[in-house]
Image: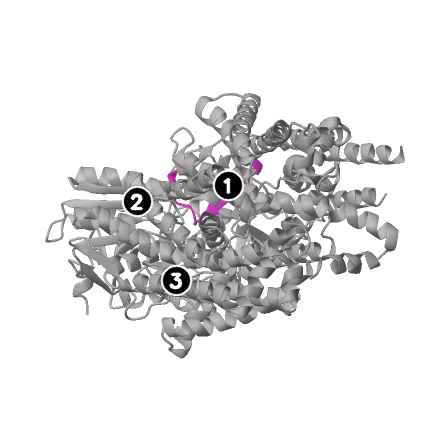
């Protein structure tokens, strides 16, 4: 009960941020919320089924370009653009999901990575997408709108995951993660489950891309299909705790806060420290923040040594 | 005639590609680590050869073994004291830690070497000869030969030596490896060291045909990834073959479809091969 | 519970980022987010060093006079890590939290395209010397000014010169990368070539950051154009030249590059292979370019070299012009109000070590390119409206060089 009250309080605090935060906080807020959406969307497939996608930027890019093409080439309103982007991404997830979700482990990861790179290169050759020059969107000064839209999207993604973790469908996904063949024997339609999870993941990722496109006003294939984004969403989820409801959100918030604080204070050495943080995080909390929380409650600082002992050679 | 020339270009490029992917495939196949810092190791190898050449005046091809020895040590230490700590956790974690490592190495390289473009430019770097109307660049031919030589040596090492058999046994399972009486911690470190040494050799050759900056790593990692998958993880010679496939596909594709399509070709090919041959992929995983 | 604490902590960190505004005093702060690390750091450093050098020189001569009061200039410089998205957030931070008075630009057209939106959104003028693409100035923005000449005009002086050289160039190979800047260059050049009556026999676009030119070079070899006009980024130019040599691919008379040739780095990386390459620059460190703070461009180049250990090129000079634009505009406006200063920038008209600075209605400067050539490891000015020095022409093929 207390827990839900606290979550509601934090959500309210975040929703009212435009009233008391300054422009920079909102700016960083939009960014933190959008990457949290990406992490949460990745979590739906990667966290629950264990299928680690390294190509979710495919859907991000499609969402970005769907919105940008609708607005810049056809002068359609923003919301129509978001819909178009989401539809494109979901369609793509549906079409490629069936063949590539047959692959397992690193092979799935690499197929998705390849897909995103190939699509990025393809978009760079399409006239309607402005080729590699990119597209320019109209400028709006309404950062509050972007902030609240991002927050609403994150809330929707998180609620979806909360529902997932309690539903029969979610159980099916977890069964796939634990042992796919056994899940199939038990009557789980594994292909259907995985494809639905991928489509859901694509939906949230694409809308985040669309919001970002309108906010940043200029997009090109390199920024829309940014391959470092793939790695970042995985890191944030794994940092927070894959397969949990709040882990990816917390992980994304903490890592973006660290990254932005480093980038705006010590500036040039930021990348170095970010790299070191990731290396240390993997060594000392390989199962994520949420697990770190439980472990600390059980055994205190000894947890760190225990995990290292468990996974080292 | 143009087609023959394109074919030669592709084959020579492919040899270097194959060498780049060799170390990655070895580490992946044996240790089950997808090393995202592989490109950064190639970059470090490139700098090593560059400084041996410009600083000590050692011919780049003669400097290769020295750079490889140095990179072996770097790789050995990385695995022994860092990667061994997490090698038994989920595959994702090895991806993340090597990504972090890549960021750190890239940053340190910029600090140490600046962002200046470096080229390894011996007097014969641009030399070539013509054979039946086809121009063959010497440096690329030599790089190609070195790539084949190293792939052959790795094959011999894995198949004809006791150490190699122990390494291959490790790839199958850890307990079996212990039967060879080798400490698996050492074995892992040595394997990663060999991977790093191969990356170092690739870096040196890359510097002879292209240029080195601290930031070349990421794209080289991606390329190595693709080739390792296409070639397969169990045989070093097939990795080089994978490199040739990509090299030829890219040169021919950029002529007939346009150079902006090279990435579509190599990554599209990757997805197609994965999807068309899932059975084989599953077996090697 | 721990989970909640962690979440509260994250929120607090996010909110905590909103620090206090910087104390102002009698200073005017110029803010910029430039590539100090990452793939563009090699050119980003020109902006860091030139901004600082210009500000130091201006402060040493008494700073900026606003209605009789004297202000010192200060620089608030952030590293955008060659990440376009981070750069945008940093510019917002500069404007709203660090409360800088005015904005200086980043390097690169793509960065300027995104970052200029921040200037427009917050109505704070930005003068940038790092983005030449026409797209930046075609959006009707009022708060963006640029000191690089328009990308589609880069080859104007070169094409003009080709008409006066003997033997005559009749066929051309045009090779350009597929990003915003280079597409603008290619588009402009195609028009120029058509007007001059030259035939384009190879017109290839390549994917930016690709390292392999052997297919394009083989094509050039089989079509044998008289000249190659190339546009792209510096590392790709290095690859192109080295691979041309190793494939012995030659145009009959002439090749030229939009970037690389004026930078010292290019010559050290290529050594003797850099010789004969033609290029262009809107700026050379000449004594004829006088300057209120540095004396002249040659003196600036010497000072720059002493201080930073490498030679400045047009990026650096253009960055100095950006800082000086603000000084001139602020003094003319007699206030620090961004809107008034913006109008004053639109009207500035002065000569400095970079050029005659005067902005067109779209905010971009107009500046002719001087054709240059590397002769025996040295940069030589060849052509601007008329021949300045004798070009080494035609360029000897690779297998005939000593």
Determine the chain carrying the residue at label 1: A
In the rendered structure, are the residues bearing label 1 and label 3 in contact, judged by CB atoms less than 8 Å apart?
Answer: no
Residue, disc 3: B147
Question: For this view, does C238 lie left or right of residue B98?
Answer: left
Q: Is residue C40 visible?
A: yes
Q: Is residue B104 visible?
A: no
Most distant residue in the right direction: A1
Asked if marks 1 and 3 fall on the same chain, the answer is: no
Q: Position of residue C150 (x, y in %)?
A: 35, 43
Q: Position of residue C11 (x, y in %)?
A: 76, 42
Residue, disc 2: B252
- Residue C130: in magenta span: yes
Question: For this view, does C17 lie left or right of residue B38?
Answer: right
Q: CA distance from mark 2 to mark 1?
A: 28 Å
Residues in magenta, as a range: C121-135
Asked if marks 3 and 2 fall on the same chain, the answer is: yes
Q: Position of residue B117 (x, y in %)?
A: 41, 62
Determine the chain carrying the residue at label 3: B
In the rendered structure, are the residues bearing label 3 and label 2 in contact, judged by CB atoms less than 8 Å apart?
Answer: no
């Amino acid at each position: 009960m207390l827990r839900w009250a606290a979550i509601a309080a934090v959500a309210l605090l975040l929703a009212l941020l435009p009233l008391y935060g300054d422009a920079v906080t909102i700016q960083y807020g939009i960014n933190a919320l959008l990457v949290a959406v990406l992490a949460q969307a990745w979590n739906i497939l990667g966290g629950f089924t264990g299928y680690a996608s390294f190509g979710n930027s495919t859907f991000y890019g499609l969402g970005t370009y769907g919105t940008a093409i609708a607005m810049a080439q056809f002068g359609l309103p923003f919301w129509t653009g978001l819909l178009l982007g989401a539809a494109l991404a979901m369609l793509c997830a549906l079409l490629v999901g069936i063949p590539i979700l047959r692959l397992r482990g690193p092979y799935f990861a690499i197929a998705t990575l390849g897909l995103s790179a190939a699509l990025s290169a393809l978009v760079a050759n399409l006239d309607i997408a402005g080729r590699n020059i990119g597209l320019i969107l109209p400028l709006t000064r309404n950062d509050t709108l972007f902030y609240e839209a991002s927050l609403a999207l994150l809330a929707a993604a998180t609620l979806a995951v909360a529902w997932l973790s309690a539903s029969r469908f979610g159980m099916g996904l977890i069964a796939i993660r634990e042992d796919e063949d056994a899940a199939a024997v038990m009557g789980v339609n594994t292909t259907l489950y995985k494809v639905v999870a991928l489509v859901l993941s694509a939906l949230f990722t694409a809308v985040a891309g669309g919001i970002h496109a309108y906010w940043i006003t200029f997009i090109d294939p390199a920024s829309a299909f940014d391959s470092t984004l793939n790695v970042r969403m995985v890191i944030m989820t794994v940092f927070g705790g894959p397969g949990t409801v709040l882990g990816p959100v917390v992980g994304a918030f903490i890592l973006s806060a660290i990254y932005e604080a480093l980038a705006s204070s010590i500036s040039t050495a930021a990348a170095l420290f970010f790299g070191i943080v990731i290396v240390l995080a993997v060594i000392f909390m390989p199962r994520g923040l949420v697990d770190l929380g439980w472990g600390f409650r059980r055994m205190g600082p000894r947890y760190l040594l225990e995990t290292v002992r468990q996974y080292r050679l | 005639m143009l087609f023959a020339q394109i074919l030669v270009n592709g084959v020579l490029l492919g040899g270097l590609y194959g060498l780049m992917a060799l170390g990655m495939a070895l580490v992946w196949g044996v240790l089950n680590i997808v090393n995202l810092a592989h490109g950064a190791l190639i970059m470090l190898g490139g700098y090593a050869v560059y400084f041996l050449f410009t600083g000590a005046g050692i011919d780049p091809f003669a400097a290769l073994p020295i750079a490889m020895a140095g990179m072996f040590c770097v790789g050995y230490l990385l695995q022994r004291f860092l990667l061994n700590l997490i090698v038994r956790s989920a595959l994702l974690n090895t991806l993340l830690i090597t990504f972090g490592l890549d960021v750190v190495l890239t940053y340190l390289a910029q600090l140490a070497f600046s962002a200046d473009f470096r080229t390894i430019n011996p007097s014969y770097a641009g030399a070539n000869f013509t054979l039946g109307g086809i121009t063959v660049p010497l440096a690329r031919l030599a790089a190609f030969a070195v790539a084949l030589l190293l792939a052959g040596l790795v094959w011999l090492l894995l198949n004809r030596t006791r150490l190699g058999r122990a390494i291959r046994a490790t790839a199958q399972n850890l307990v079996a490896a212990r039967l060879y009486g080798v400490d698996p911690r050492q074995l892992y470190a040595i394997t990663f060291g060999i991977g790093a040494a191969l990356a170092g050799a690739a870096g040196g050759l890359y510097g002879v045909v292209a240029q080195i900056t601290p930031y070349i790593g990421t794209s080289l990692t991606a390329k190595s990834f693709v080739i390792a998958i296409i070639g397969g993880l169990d045989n070093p010679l097939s990795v080089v073959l994978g490199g040739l496939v990509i090299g030829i596909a890219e040169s021919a594709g950029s002529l007939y479809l346009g150079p902006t399509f090279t990435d579509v070709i190599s990554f599209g090919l990757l997805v197609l091969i994965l999807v068309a041959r899932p059975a084989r992929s599953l077996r090697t995983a | 519970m721990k989970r909640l604490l962690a979440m509260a902590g994250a929120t607090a960190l996010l909110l905590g980022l909103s620090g206090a505004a910087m104390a102002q005093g009698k200073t005017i702060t110029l803010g910029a987010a430039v590539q100090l690390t990452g793939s563009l750091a090699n050119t980003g450093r020109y902006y860091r060093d030139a901004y600082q050098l210009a500000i130091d020189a201006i402060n040493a001569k008494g700073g900026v006079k606003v209605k009789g009061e004297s202000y010192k200039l200060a620089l608030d410089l952030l590293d955008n890590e060659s990440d376009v998205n981070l750069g945008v957030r940093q510019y917002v931070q500069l404007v709203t939290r660090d409360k800088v008075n005015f904005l200086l630009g980043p390097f690169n057209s793509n960065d300027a395209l995104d970052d200029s939106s921040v200037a427009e959104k917050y109505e704070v003028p930005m003068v940038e010397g790092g983005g030449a693409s026409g797209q930046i100035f075609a959006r009707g923005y009022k708060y963006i000014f640029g000191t690089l000449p328009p990308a589609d005009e880069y080859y104007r002086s070169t094409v003009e010169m080709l008409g006066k050289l003997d033997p005559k160039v009749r066929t051309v190979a045009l090779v350009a990368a597929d990003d915003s800047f280079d597409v603008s260059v290619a588009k402009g050049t195609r028009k120029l070539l058509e007007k001059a009556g030259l035939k384009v026999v190879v017109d290839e676009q390549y994917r930016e950051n690709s390292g392999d030119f052997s297919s394009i070079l083989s094509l050039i070899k089989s079509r044998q154009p008289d000249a190659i006009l190339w546009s792209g980024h510096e590392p790709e130019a290095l690859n192109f030249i080295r691979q041309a040599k190793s494939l012995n691919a030659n145009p009959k008379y002439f090749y030229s590059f939009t970037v690389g040739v004026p930078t010292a780095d290019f010559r050290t990386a290529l050594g003797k292979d850099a010789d004969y390459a033609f290029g262009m620059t809107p700026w050379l460190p000449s004594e004829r370019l006088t300057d209120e703070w540095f004396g002249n461009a040659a003196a600036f180049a010497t000072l720059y070299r002493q201080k930073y250990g490498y030679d400045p090129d047009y990026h650096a000079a253009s960055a100095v012009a950006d800082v000086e634009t603000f000084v001139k505009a602020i003094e003319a406006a007699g206030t620090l109000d961004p809107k008034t200063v913006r109008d004053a920038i639109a009207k500035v008209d002065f000569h400095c070590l970079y050029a005659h600075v005067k902005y067109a209605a779209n905010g971009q400067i107009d500046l002719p390119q001087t054709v240059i050539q590397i002769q025996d490891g040295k940069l030589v000015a060849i052509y601007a409206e008329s021949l300045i020095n004798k070009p080494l022409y035609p360029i000897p093929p690779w297998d005939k060089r000593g």
